[in-house]
Image (cartoon, rainbow, N blue to C red):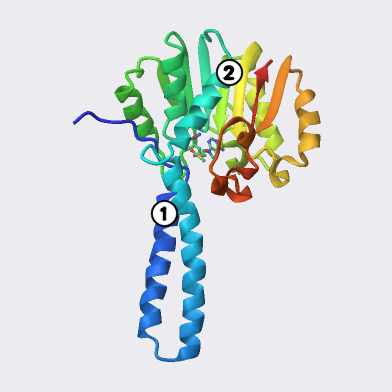
Amino acid sequence: MKASISYGNWIRKKVLLVLGLGVVSLGILFFLLSNPYLQVITGLLFVTLLISLSFPLYAYYAFSPRGGNLQDKVYRLIVESLKQPAPENALDIGTGNGVLALKLAQRYPTAQVIGLDYWGKNWEYSQAICEANARIAQVADRVRFVKGDAAKLDFNDASFAAVVSNLTFHEVKSAPQKREVVREALRVLRPGGRFAFVDYFYDSQYYGPATEFEVFLHRQGLSKIELKRLSDVLPLPRLLRHPKIFGKVGIIYGQK
Ligand SMILES: C[S@@+](CC[C@H](N)C(=O)[O-])C[C@H]1O[C@@H](n2cnc3c(N)ncnc32)[C@H](O)[C@@H]1O
């Protein structure tokens, strides 16, 4: 059987497992209890947990290749938003299982691509999976995966012709101000280079009010910059437009 690329999923299996076990345990408890008051409480908890499970379960399905394939659609959107003729090199920050890095390498057959991540224990991604994915996609000779911190990239200023990142900046614990992670990503982009980043740019807890964030972006010395809500550029199922899933996600792209 032909090996296929392991996408991983933005919804962690661990989360689904914990919620699933909670639902099953409460269901069993409900039938074992004889006290009607305790039965009512257990029943209410069961329904609450079931609703809490159904939401990420639906998102898991919608993201996966067997469901709505939304992860792939977001990767494609990022690559297309670069509007780059042929970058000689590119960086994907917070590469996860490396799929966006592979898409870049496939789209630009002469580019050298680096996928960077810290591959922390709280995620179900790894450098080994990235490297296996690169071999399956037949781009291993041009894609390299390195461990690093998005808050302090180990590259000189202006090292890359293209820089991308997906759903990573808000996760960077080593940077309390997520705008600084954006600034760091732009630091390694060369003048004239293109960038495309997807993240919770409309969530003020990470980036401050959207109007202020736009001012910040316009002060980064970029020649072109667009900030848009993801739901305005990609058709999203209604449930996924919820603020906890993609409602506050935006894309910024442009040129330095
Ligand atoms: C939601 S996942 C997205 C992964 C990948 N970009 C994708 O689209 O599938 C967030 C990623 O950010 C990475 N990450 C979190 N903090 C990081 C840091 N300080 N430096 C580098 N990567 C980090 C995690 O390891 C994880 O792979």
Nearer mark to the viewer, of 2 and 1: 2
x and y, in percent, of residue 214 in the image: 77, 31
Question: Which residue is drawn at the image coordinates 47% and 43% (left, top)?
Answer: 10
x and y, in percent, of residue 187 in the image: 66, 21
Residue occupied by mark 1: 14
- 107 up-or-down from 201: above or below: above
Badge 2: few (under 14), some or many (20 or more) residues near its Cα, within 10 Å? many
Question: Which residue is drawn at the image coordinates 57% and 46% (left, top)?
Answer: 238
- 205 up-or-down from 85: above or below: below
Question: Is residue 80 visible to the viewer in this orientation of the structure?
Answer: yes
Question: Which residue is drawn at the image coordinates 41% and 54% (left, top)?
Answer: 14
Question: Is residue 122 visible to the viewer in this orientation of the structure?
Answer: no
- Residue 109: image quadrant is top left
Residue farthest toward the bottom in the current orientation of the protein: 35
Between discs 2 and 1, the one toward the N terminus: 1
x and y, in percent, of residue 166 in the image: 55, 33
* Residues at discs 2 and 1 in contact (Cβ within 8 Å): no
| Quadrant assignment for the C terminus | top right
Residue occupied by mark 2: 82
Circle number at residue 169: none
Q: Secondary structure at mark 2?
A: helix
Question: Hey, what amino acid is under mark 2?
Answer: Leu
Badge 1: few (under 14), some or many (20 or more) residues near its Cα, within 10 Å? few
Disc 2 to disc 1, C-alpha distance: 34 Å
Q: How many marks?
A: 2
Question: Hey, what amino acid is under mark 1?
Answer: Lys
CB at mark 1 closer than 8 A to ligand 1? no
x and y, in percent, of residue 1 in the image: 18, 31
Residue farthest toward the left in the current orientation of the protein: 1
Left or right: residue 3 compared with residue 155: left
Q: Secondary structure at mark 1?
A: helix
